[in-house]
Amino acid sequence: MQAPTVDELLTNGVFLQAMESAWQDSMPHEPSLRHEEGGWVYTKIATGEVLIRRSAAGAKSEIDLSHPPIVDEAVVVATFHTHPQPTSEGWLTEPSAGDTRLALAQGVPCFIRAEDGVHVTGPESRRGGLTGAPSFPS
């Protein structure tokens, strides 16, 4: 079994629902309360089932996704987070240089939900497939 690709995750209902929930929870329409939300995407090794684990809420323009919880018989295949700050206030919606560096270092795609849709950075799928460490591939 292979790790899901970016395109496959973008058509997965479980993942898409998690992204939309994170977007709503990030309060994009509440200027004083906006913050990043996100989490990790896992694949069960035996079945290919996609699972989601959310992280603690982030700050105005950052979130820590560096310590995914271990999920039995599953591996991390992607991360996701929101960029709720609007372009009308001078914010960028696409991945930051830091988002890209982290996705490449972690070896999994990073999805970002913003006001203009979903952006992706990093590899096309988990480096090394479903083998290796249950968190990020080594």
Image (spheres, rainbow, N blue to C red):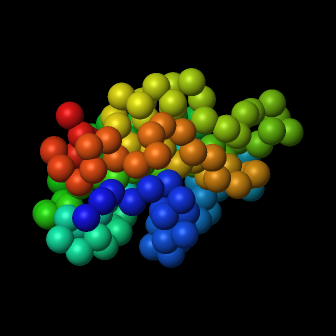
The residue lying toward the viewer, choosing from 57 and 1, is 1
The residue lying toward the viewer, choosing from 113 and 124, is 124
Q: Locate residue 115, reporting x and y percent.
A: 74, 52
- Residue at 73% x, 34% y: name it: 92
Relative to residue 125, is residue 72 depicted above or below?
below
Q: Locate residue 49, reporting x and y percent.
A: 31, 73
Tell me, yes or no, if residue 38 can be seen here.
no
- Residue at 80% x, 30% y: name it: 90
State left or right for residue 32 relative to residue 75: right
- Residue at 86% x, 39% y: name it: 88
Quarter that holds the N terminus: bottom left
State left or right for residue 25 relative to residue 86: left
The residue lying toward the viewer, choosing from 42 and 53, is 42
Quarter that holds the C terminus: top left
Q: Locate residue 4, reporting x and y percent.
A: 39, 60
Relative to residue 35, is residue 19 depicted above or below?
below
Q: Locate residue 103, reporting x and y percent.
A: 43, 35
Tell me, yes or no, if residue 99 can be seen here.
yes
Quarter of the image where one finds residue 44: bottom left
Quarter of the image where one finds residue 91: top right
Relative to residue 124, is residue 54 depicted above or below?
below
Which residue in the rendered view is the most extreme toward the front?
A: 1
- Residue at 50% x, 54% y: name it: 6
Number of numbered discs on residues: 0
The residue lying toward the viewer, choosing from 88 and 135, is 135
